[in-house]
Image: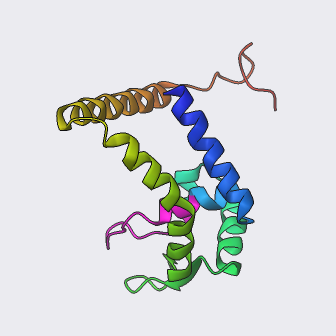
Amino acid sequence: MRGFTYESDRYVERTAALHGLHRTDLNALGFLIRPSTPERPLTPGRLGEALNLSSPATTALVDRLERSGHVNRRRSQSDRRQVELAMTNHARDVGRALFTPLAQQLRGAAEKYTAPEIELVTRFLLDMTSATEAARNALTVPAAGTPDAPAS
């Protein structure tokens, strides 16, 4: 899994560099391509939370994505005070161009496996993802003044 994660990261970094995008921009587009619902619209706040960004960093990111034609800001239909983000067709086209070669390679590799093997690997990866998420959620920040506390 470590090797796959490493190579996936390197692919994204190379792809971003070749197209003049920042790694965070691609991560944002990867999040934004997920469908939203009326109950959970795609907002700058949700984007920042998903990418673990501060409010100023999220604003800078959305500004960059808007300038490059990848997202539009629009007022919520249900709450005009709230801003929602929408991917543009340009962003979808760029995403397809960037990730179609990877998808083709992955599809070719996956075709070597039977349906039961794919099911087992899928279950394994979902379980490992859940375990990693649980470990992350269990982490606590040491109290100020303790030896393991981060420096301010």
Is 107 left, or right, of 42 in this rendering?
Answer: left
Q: Would you say residue 33 sits in the magenta stretch?
A: yes
Please say whether residue 85 is visible from this viewpoint.
no
Residue 122 in the image: x percent, y percent?
29, 36
Determine whether 100 is above or below 62 in the image: above
Please say whether residue 90 is visible from this viewpoint.
yes
Label count reads 0
- The C terminus lies in quadrant: top right
Determine whether 46 is above or below 94 in the image: above
Q: Nearer the viewer, residue 35 or 1?
A: 1
Is 107 left, or right, of 29 in this rendering?
Answer: left
Q: Residue furthest left?
A: 116
Residue 6 in the image: x percent, y percent?
60, 34
When asked about the image quadrant of residue 17, the answer is bottom right
Residue extent of the magenta highlight: 28-46
Is 137 left, or right, of 52 in this rendering?
Answer: left
Residue displayed at 45% across by 66% down: 33
When asked about the image quadrant of residue 135, the answer is top left
Residue displayed at 36% across by 67% down: 35
Residue 77 in the image: x percent, y percent?
39, 87
Q: Nearer the viewer, residue 123 or 7?
A: 7
Q: Nearer the viewer, residue 94 or 127?
A: 94
